Amino acid sequence: MAAFRDMEELSQGLLSLLGTNRAEAQQRRLLGRYEQMVERLLEAQDGAERLLREILTSEEKVAQSLLDTKEEAHQGKADVQGLEAELDQASKEDSCLKASLLQLTRELEELKELEAELQQQEREVEEDTTVTIPSAVYVAQLYHRISKIEWDYECEPGVVKGIHHGPSVAQPIHLDSTQLSKKFISDHLWSLVDTKW
């Protein structure tokens, strides 16, 4: 602003010089002031250009910083979305695992109940068998009384051997099970049993 005022003053001085045709001293003085003013204008222009370059550099830095910040924010948002997706997946898996664990717990409880029932049934069966199932000796005696067959337990495998004590005569039994069918052997042995009681 001061430089423009000086230029205006210089212009008026030049006009007055031309109009009045004054002395050379005044002209030198005005020319000196004009040179100073031009010098100050050049300095001001240099300062303005330097200041403009600094401002542009600062603006570039701020713009780059803003771009970097936006990029970081965008990346952070993507990371957060990824973490949210992972959390959602983990939550679903956790729900599935909890449901599976609950199901397995129920099945385990059912198995424990079933095991307890089986143990109870085994105890009942053991109690029942001790009371109702006759001993092997008793069964053998019962078979002997009904069939009147005395078995030879020391014969070779595959041979049915013994003595049938019939109503009148004792009759030996010697059957080869490798050559005779089980049905034939069974029918033959039943035919020896006396049906008269």
Image (cartoon, rainbow, N blue to C red):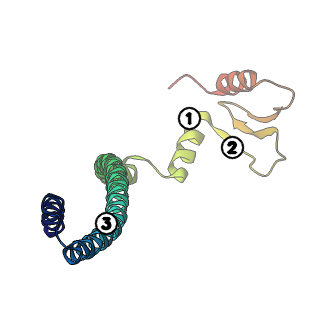
Q: Report how far apart the C-alphas of labels 3 and 1 lie in the structure.
A: 141 Å
The relative height of residue 48 versus residue 169 in the rendered view (above or below) is below
Say the numbered circle drawn on residue 45: 3
Residue at image position (56%, 35%) is 146
Give residue 38's position: percent from left, percent from top. Answer: 29, 69
- The answer to whether one can see residue 119 in this image is no
Amino acid type indicated by mark 3: Gln
Q: Is residue 88 left or right of residue 177?
A: left
Could you say which disc has been placed on residue 146 in the image? 1
Describe the element under mark 3 as helix, strand or loop: helix
Residue occupied by mark 2:
150
The amino acid pointed to by label 1 is: Ile
- Residue plotted at (19% across, 75% down): 26
Residue type at mark 2 is Glu
Residue at 30% over, 47% down: 88
Q: Position of residue 119 (x, y in %)?
A: 35, 54
Question: N-terminal of the two: label 3 or label 1?
Answer: 3
